[in-house]
């Protein structure tokens, strides 16, 4: 009798909330250098966790990330002529490492 292989991983389905986690891909020199070593940078929602980002990348792009790093960039304090000071918005970035054989098309599924 042939044995049935049981997949332990569940397929993650892209829901409306998943698209809110990944705001936009970051296009910069650092992101270009990161893409040479199979990495991608995204701006993510302020309340997103590493697990949320990994699930969103897997659901949207069908690639399971190997590692996710998150950085919070605080807004700079700016002064305006005669109007006092204000702060720029907070930005949360996620640097996602992908497997060696994975290719990610950022223009698809957005």
Image: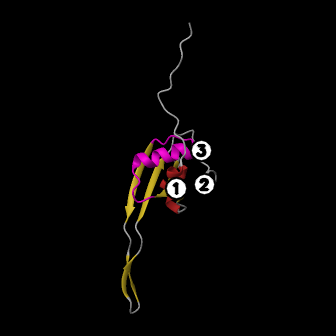
Q: Which quadrant is home to the N terminus?
A: top right
Please, what secondary structure does the residue beneath circle 2 have? loop
In the rendered image, residue 24, in percent from the top left (x then y), is placed at 53, 59
Upstream in the sequence, badge 3 or badge 1? 1
Instruction: Decide if residue 17 is on the left or right side of residue 46.
Output: right
Residue 90, image quadrant: bottom left
Residue 33 badge: 1
Looking at the image, is mark 2 or mark 1 earlier in the sequence?
Answer: 1
* In this view, the mark in front (2 or 1): 2
Residue 99, x across and y down, in percent: 51, 40
**Where is mark 2, residue-wise?**
110
Q: CA distance from mark 2 to mark 1?
A: 22 Å
Q: Nearer the viewer, residue 43 or 95?
A: 43
**Residue on which disc 3 sits:** 103
Front tag of 3 and 1: 3
Q: Residue at x 39, y 58 (%)?
A: 71
The vertical placement of 94 against 55, above or below, is: below
């Amino acid at each position: 009798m042939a044995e049935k292989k049981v997949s332990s991983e569940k397929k993650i389905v892209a829901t409306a909330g998943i698209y809110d986690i990944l705001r936009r891909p970051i296009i910069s020199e650092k992101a270009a250098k990161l893409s040479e070593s199979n990495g991608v940078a995204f701006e993510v929602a302020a309340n997103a966790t590493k697990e949320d980002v990994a699930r969103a990348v897997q659901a949207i792009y069908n690639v399971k990330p190997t590692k996710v790093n998150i950085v919070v960039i605080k807004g700079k304090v700016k002064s305006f002529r005669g109007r006092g000071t204000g702060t720029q918005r907070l930005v949360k970035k996620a640097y996602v490492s992908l497997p060696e054989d994975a290719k990610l098309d950022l223009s698809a599924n957005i």
